[in-house]
Image (cartoon, rainbow, N blue to C red):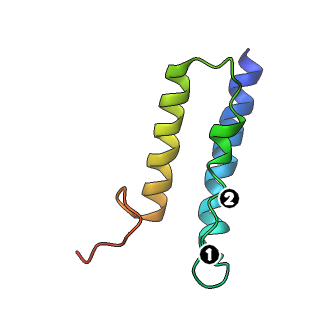
Amino acid sequence: MTYLYLKNAGRFIFLVLFQVWILNNLRVGGYINPYFYIYFVLLLPFSAPKWLLLVSSFLLGISIDLFMNTRGSMQRLPY
């Protein structure tokens, strides 16, 4: 069980850093920005408790927002 938590924590860190360092600088066709970090939620096991899914998804979203400096929205605000 501990191995499963460590595996998911490593996947979480890898996907957030991969998104921030590589995929945020990549533009497909000049407009499309690929979001690969969502793959973390899809890879969680079905047997995971619902509270773990909710908490890990929240932490994933807030960490991506902090690194992308978007404050929870996809548009840059003028202030």
Classed neighbour count for the residue bearing mark 1: other residues with Cα under 10 Å, few (<14), some (14–19), many (≥20): few
The disc, 1 or 2, on the residue closer to the chain's N-terminal end is 2
**Res 65 quadrant in image:** bottom left
Q: Is residue 72 above or below residue 57?
A: below
On the image, the x and y values in percent for residue 71 come to: 34, 59
Classed neighbour count for the residue bearing mark 2: other residues with Cα under 10 Å, few (<14), some (14–19), many (≥20): some
State the quadrant of the C terminus.
bottom left
Q: Secondary structure at mark 2?
A: helix
* Horizontal side, residue 4 vs residue 40: left or right: right
**Res 43 quadrant in image:** top right
Q: Could you give the CA–CA distance between mark 1 and mark 2, rounded to whole angstroms?
A: 11 Å
Q: Which mark is residue 45?
A: none
On the image, the x and y values in percent for residue 77 come to: 29, 72
Outermost top residue: 1
Residue ID at (63%, 38%): 41
Residue ID at (49%, 21%): 51
Residue ID at (55%, 28%): 53
On the image, the x and y values in percent for residue 2 come to: 72, 17
Instruction: State the residue position of label 2.
Output: 18
Q: Nearer the viewer, residue 42 or 26?
A: 42
Q: Which mark is residue 25?
A: 1
Inspect the image, locate mark 1, and give the three-letter code of the amino acid beneath it.
Asn
Outermost left residue: 79
**Res 19 quadrant in image:** bottom right
Inspect the image, locate mark 2, and give the three-letter code of the amino acid beneath it.
Phe
* Horizontal side, residue 63 vs residue 15: left or right: left
Residue ID at (52%, 38%): 57
